[in-house]
Image (spheres, rainbow, N blue to C red):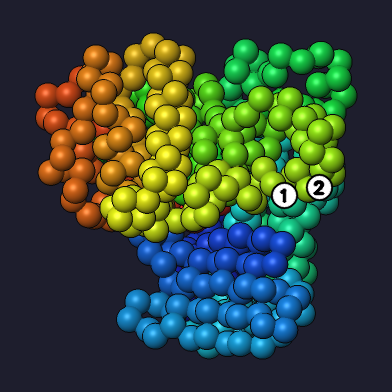
Amino acid sequence: MTSHPSPTTAPSDEPRSAPVASRVLVLNSGSSSVKYQLLDMRDGSRLAVGLVERIGEETSRLKHTPPAGGHPREQFGPVADHEAALKAVATELAADGLGLDSPELAAIGHRVVHGGMYFTEPTVIDDAVLAEIERLIPVAPLHNPANLTGIRTAMALRPDLPQVAVFDTAFHTTMPESAARYAIDVKTADEHRIRRYGFHGTSHAYVSRATARLLGRAPEDVNVIVLHLGNGASASAVRNGRCVDTSMGLTPLEGLVMGTRSGDMDPAVIFHLMRVGGMSTDEIDTLLNKQSGLIGLCGDNDMREIRRRIDEGDEQARLAFDIYIHRLKKYIGAYYAVLGRVDAIAFTAGVGENAAPVREAAIAGLEEMGLAVDGDLNAVRSDEPRLISPPDARVAVAVVPTDEELEIATQTYALVGKNHA
Ligand code: AMP
């Protein structure tokens, strides 16, 4: 391994009491993709952003966007596995002078979807941590194996570097048992670790804090309902900075209507589909996770397309939108009741940040709850956190862009710094 001296690196004879390196690489490894961002933690800026997709296929693609002003570079052709993908990423980063062997790289932060009840905080990865993430595979069969592959590959490339796991579930581990437990036989639930874990936690944590900042208050003083509305969607109730309820459950299938997932449903629908519909477990899994939600209701899961069809008078798209909004309203009401006092409702992720009609419809008619949206403010397009409620509203309604990569990098860097102190 080569290392290059750089202006921000401490001279080698100086004791290293804090990480002088300022960069964190964030890796989000899916089953056939790796997304990455390299951040400079002095100001949170992006030094590089990219992804490798369709790993294991003939038609893999790497897209790498270099530091500000640089033109994105794309490569097409087979990338056999995650190891090949990460090596290709390392080569791209090195071409911009940002190689994985740089002494300015402080750590690698990995998104890990399922941390169960065990991981309540970001954690430096060692063999015991790897074993625990592996033990959680039965409750996250799609995500944790891919996350593990990414971690193991990155550890092989930089065995000397701190690697940190940041869990999607961690923010939700503060939920009380009354919210986290399903009302099923306790012994059966415990034996199979069945409970509400919740997901998108990194986003809910980031957005709830950013909302408090927008209000000029400390997160510990604020109660927020966060509506993370992307292709996957979840709501959370956050009291004084801690999650007290969230809509996703054992898996990300529960809760809101999503792009391709049904969200809440009578569980007996599944027995009915098996007994009367003759469907297999895998077929029902696919139906509810990939062919339901907006796409199941109207054939489209992109809110832009659904809005366009509604504008053209398409009744099926209208009904899909109405079902989506009805569910959203039910969660706003439920979490209002759970929290008792609500200071703000924050919309985030692809739909929440961009779809003004969704925000307007979700809040419409809730004036008695102190909720309202100002049409002009709601129409503003911006990447900045902003209020869309009228100035005299009792409850703030906000649009707060999420930044999961920054949150992962921040948590990773803070942990590495703490361990150095
Ligand atoms: P995410 O999972 O957070 O990346 O969100 C992706 C989803 O956001 C897409 O499937 C769209 O439904 C939605 N979306 C993105 N941009 C817009 C937009 N300009 N207007 C409405 N919806 C949008």
Which residue lies at the image location 41% right of the left edge and 67% below the top edge? 46
| Quarter of the figure with residue 373 | top left
Residue 121 visible in image: no
Q: Nearer the viewer, residue 344 or 314?
A: 314
Identified by mark 2, the residue type is: Asp
User: Quarter holding the N terminus?
Assistant: bottom right
Looking at the picture, how far across and down is residue 202, in whole percent?
Answer: 52, 43
Q: In the figure, is residue 230 to the left or right of 386?
A: right
- Circle 1 — which element? helix
Q: Nearer the viewer, residue 276 or 129?
A: 276
Q: Is residue 233 above or below residue 111?
A: above
Looking at the picture, how far across and down is residue 123, in whole percent?
Answer: 66, 44
Looking at the picture, how far across and down is residue 110, in whole percent?
Answer: 63, 56
CB of mark 2 near ligand 1 (< 8 Å): no
Q: Mark 1 points at which residue?
A: 286
Report the Cα–Cα distance between label 1 and label 2. 6 Å
Q: In the figure, is residue 386 to the left or right of 235?
A: left
Q: Which of 153 and 234 is in front in this view?
A: 234
Q: In this view, does 45 lie above or below 142?
A: below
Q: In the figure, is residue 181 to the left or right of 387?
A: right
Binning the other alpha carbons within 10 Å of mark 1 as few (below 14), some (14 to 19) or many (20 upward) gives: some
Q: How many labels does the image show?
A: 2
Q: Mark 2 points at which residue?
A: 282
Q: In this view, does 180 lie above or below 264?
A: above
| Quarter of the figure with residue 337 | top left
Does the CB distance between marks 1 and 2 fall below 8 Å?
yes
| Quarter of the figure with residue 252 | top right
